[in-house]
Amino acid sequence: MTTNDKTWPQTLWDFFCSLKLTMFLLIALAVISIIGTVIPQGTPPPEYLQTISQNKLKLYQTLGFFDMYHSWWFILLLSLLCINLISCSIKRLPGIWVTITQPILIMSDELGGSLSSRKMFMINGDARTLCDRVAAVLKMEFAAPVITEDGGAFHLFAQKSPWSRMAVYAVHLSVLVIFIGAIIGSLFGYKGYVNIIEGQTISNVMSRSDKEIDLGFAVRCEKFSVANYPNGAPKEFKSILTVLENGRPVPDYTNVRVIVNDPLSYKGITFYQSSYGKLGEHEFTISDPDGKNPQPLSIKSGGSAKLPDGNGICLQETTADISQFQSGISGPAAQVEAHLANGESKTFIVYADNPAMNKMNLPYTGGKLLQYKGGEEFVYTGLQVAKDPGVWVVWLGCFLMVVGIYVAFFMSHRRIWVRVENGMVTIWSNASKNKGGFQLFMKQLETKLDKQYSVEDNK
Amino acid sequence: MTSSLLFNITTLLYLASMLAFFAALANRTKPFFGMAGSYIAFGGLFLQTIAIGLRWKESYTLGVGHAPLSNLYESVVFFSWTIVLIYGLLDLKYRYRVIGAFVMPFALLGMAWAQLGMKSGIEPLVPALQSNWLLYHVITCFLGYAAFAVACGISIMYLIRETHERAAQANEKSVVATFPPSRVLDDLNYKAIMIGFPLLTLGIITGAAWANYAWGTYWSWDPKETWSLIVWFIYAAFLHARITKGWVGRRAAWLSIIGFAATIFCYLGVNLLLSGLHSYGG
């Protein structure tokens, strides 16, 4: 039978066991993954859609480029990688297992010839005494040997860290464990978000796919605050949250501080500080400079409105009492940005109790008098919500991977065989990794053994 | 003494070290130059270590105390430091000084760019970075990147030397003949990646752990994350290339060079060219 006559299962098996497939898959995954870093993932933003043609958009959508890491072809490549590494492991493990559990105790000249390191000494002496001495040195310098007597010769075998040969399979297994963790997470977990107004309670969150999810308990936002550095850069976003079961606060989960990098976890569901905002309604009047013909104008927090002259204004900030910012003035006030006809923007303060000062803004409001009446404003905290029962499986996989890589790279299965006959000692050695380092060690060991014999000779 | 002054001296020392290594290549009979290159590099590393510590202390004096790993300037400086550190470890262990000629340029480039082209002010930490994970994540990633930088330098040497070995006559006295033999360079390349790969793996895992702790997702296919995985795939391919027929030698060296190019893109390109969660410049 020639190699061309292989049955198709055999051909398929060889294909999945091949390292060339591994190389192809790793490089293909590396190259293909680039697509999703250049093309935005998820719902593409309108600014991006303007930059590509309709045909391109259709093509990308058909190929799944907007969610490529979950597309069938990307999953297929990952699956092939898994099958590849399982096949390789199944093919090679039995042999490795035998090497570990059933070591060769008696080294023959034929087998020994294939080992790189071999050394012979000619020594006078009784084999049994020599054997004891060699065994003592091995035990002291390396590992206790197994001694087999065979036809008047003594065969010593000693080894260190045989299990390190399994490390590479542990790394392969860890990849599978991580995938299993990811699958558990996507089947039984979810990612969502919720906005909670200060003082309000919620018991539902929205998932990323816009489905409402019942938490099974409730969360109240007691307070939200922002702290800044002296230079104005944000220092801390902080929510105070309370978990409620049947309307009653849960002890230990009452008034919990949640900041970025310090979330709240309850019953496997975790809440992460993610954003914040203001909700509210503010009342203004716009009138003639002397206060006649007042028209009401209402603007939402952070919202904008059009003035009679056609220019727009944006509401930036409001306060119930301006005195903490400007001494000598009191009452509610609003900070407004006006977009002027000449394209410029101007920011100014509108007061509730200082019509005289409001008159200074006439040039920016088209000659009309803008006055603040006050308003109601609520701060809300934006929280990411996640439940992922697979995350511990992923960490287990990561742990296995790190330990496996360390052992696979830096530990080596080292073996020494010694044959002691009357008048002759032969040594073979082998290491699975770092052969150069082991050769140095062997040289030192051989020198030590040599010394032992010399002592013997001098007697 | 300010950290800024020490960083400037460090930059000059790395320049001197690189020039000494170049001189060592040109004068193969004089071991003095190679030794000078190494010792100047170690001196620079020592000064830079003090400078980084000093900058850390200065940030506390300014009342915004944090490890100096928070923006592009600080990360480039730290990257240079890790490159010289990894080179130093390889030099002490394997005694092939002359690879410094292909490694120190990376460290010098980093320092020169940071000192001449970047704002070096100490800024307070934005909330997203206020975590101990910052330290673990950045240190493991950059040690990994640095090992890849060293491997890339060695691979370039390998390609030059290997081409030369195939073409040249024995006993020829060109500059390339002073390179270690290609067999040795191939082995050093592997040794450097053996340092880098576990560190990159740890860097990705600590990043995932941090993301999970701060955002509730250990992986979100953000460009930075994806590029770190691309780098991981390339070096995984490199490790398998060494036991695959037809991939040993030149192809493996090319994988190492491409891997470092991807590393640099992951580090700088993603921040400068693509958008995503990881916009601190680190």
Image (tube, rainbow, N blue to C red):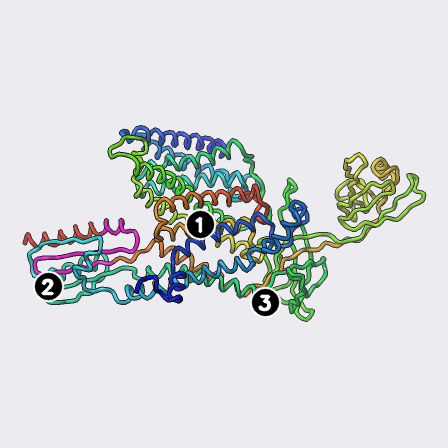
From this view, report whether residue A166 is shown above or below residue B144.
Answer: below
Residue drawn where x is 88% and y is 40% of the image: A368
Instruction: Where is residue A381? Give x, y as percent.
Output: 68, 55
Residue drawn where x is 28% and y is 64% of the image: A99
Q: Chain of mark 3?
A: A
Instruction: Where is residue A391? Give x, y as percent.
Output: 52, 62
Q: In the rendered image, which quarter contains the C terminus of chain A? A: bottom left
Q: Is residue B147 magenta?
A: no
Give the labeled residue for mark 2. A128
Q: Give the structural element (helix, strand or loop) at label 1.
A: helix
Residue drawn where x is 82% and y is 40% of the image: A311
Q: Give the structural element (helix, strand or loop) at label 2.
A: helix
User: Which stretch is magenta?
Assistant: A415-441
Residue flagged by tag 1: what amino acid is it? Ile
**Is the residue marked by circle 3 packed among few (<14), some (14-19), or many (20+) residues within 10 Å?**
few
Residue A249 is left or right of residue A99, and the answer is: right
| Gap in angstroms between the C-alphas marked 3 and 2 | 69 Å
Instruction: Where is residue A289? Give x, y as percent.
Output: 91, 39
| Gap in angstroms between the C-alphas marked 1 and 3 | 40 Å
Residue flagged by tag 3: what amino acid is it? Lys
Give the labeled residue for mark 1. B234
Give the labeled residue for mark 3. A267
**Is the residue marked by circle 1 packed among few (<14), some (14-19), or many (20+) residues within 10 Å?**
many
Residue A1 is left or right of residue A312, and the answer is: left
